[in-house]
Image: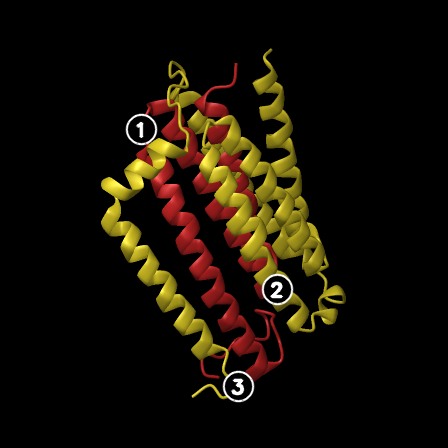
Chain colours: A red, B yellow
Amino acid sequence: MIGLEHYLIVSALLFCLGLLGVIVRRNLLIIYMSLELMLNAANLALVAFSRFTNHLNGQVMVFFIITVAAAEVAVGLALIVALYRKRQTAHVEDLTLMKL
Amino acid sequence: MQATDIFFIGFALLTLTCGILVIVNRNPVNSAMFLVLTIASLAGLFVLLNAFFLAAVQVLVYAGAVMVLFLFVIMLLDLKEEQRRTIRKFSLALGGLAVGTVAFLLVRSIWFSGVGRAAQPQLEGGTRPLGTALFQDFLLPFEIVSVILLVAMVGVVLLSKKELK
């Protein structure tokens, strides 16, 4: 029987995958995708809690997270494009100066 | 074993496998494609949790809009050189060790805390109760989120102008 803890374990593992991606990869876009993975892991945990504790608030929270994540992705990608125009690179190893 | 359990195992394995493939792939386009698969199988898990509306939103917003944005940017930037660069073995080992420890601690604490051991799936879910909650109890956050979207749109237009001043 699949219970709450199984969903939470899947969510934890997915979160750790995203964390690993952020730590190991050097490409800004891949790091960004890993961030999305972590957000989705949190969403999964919230929906699972919502289902097993009979509260709808978790699902409402996930709805807002998805909306804010969409806005955040748009802004972040625009920043990456602007950075790429200035520096011609999307690698964190090449982006060591704070000034443009 | 019920059918939903089998579906859960399938979707969970698909999610984690595609998640691994997202971070090990050399080519950013492949990574984005595997991220789409991850998100789609997460939508499957949402359906198993009776969150039908969220599953639909997940596919529409994430697998649709966000991933199209990602692919656009990947193709806008020339990332050919990504293939040449190697991941440093040292950082891979160290990062893997650190994250492995975190994963071990998380899974262990979830497993032994007994959270949800007695909890039964209760919530019926569905679109109608979610809509009611959104437009009655959470009306103000809902409106604020729409303002956030507007601000993000204006910001993106400003950031994407040729001359960044």
Residue B15: % across, % down: 61, 37
Residue B35: % across, % down: 62, 49
| Relative horizontal placement of residue A65, taking residue B94 as reference (left or right) | left
- Residue type at mark 3? Lys
**Residue A19 showing in the rendered view:** no
Query: In what element is the residue under mark 2?
Result: loop
Badge 1: chain ID: A
Query: In what element is the residue under mark 3?
Result: loop
- Same chain for mark 1 and mark 3? The answer is no
Q: Which mark is residue A55?
A: 1
Q: Residue B40 is drawn in which quadrant? A: top right
Query: First in sequence: mark 2 or mark 1?
Result: 2
- Residue type at mark 2? Asn
Within-10-Å neighbours for mark 2: few <14, some 14–19, many 20+? many
Q: Quadrant of the C terminus of chain B?
A: bottom left
Give the residue displayed 30% in from the left and 50% down from the top.
Answer: B142
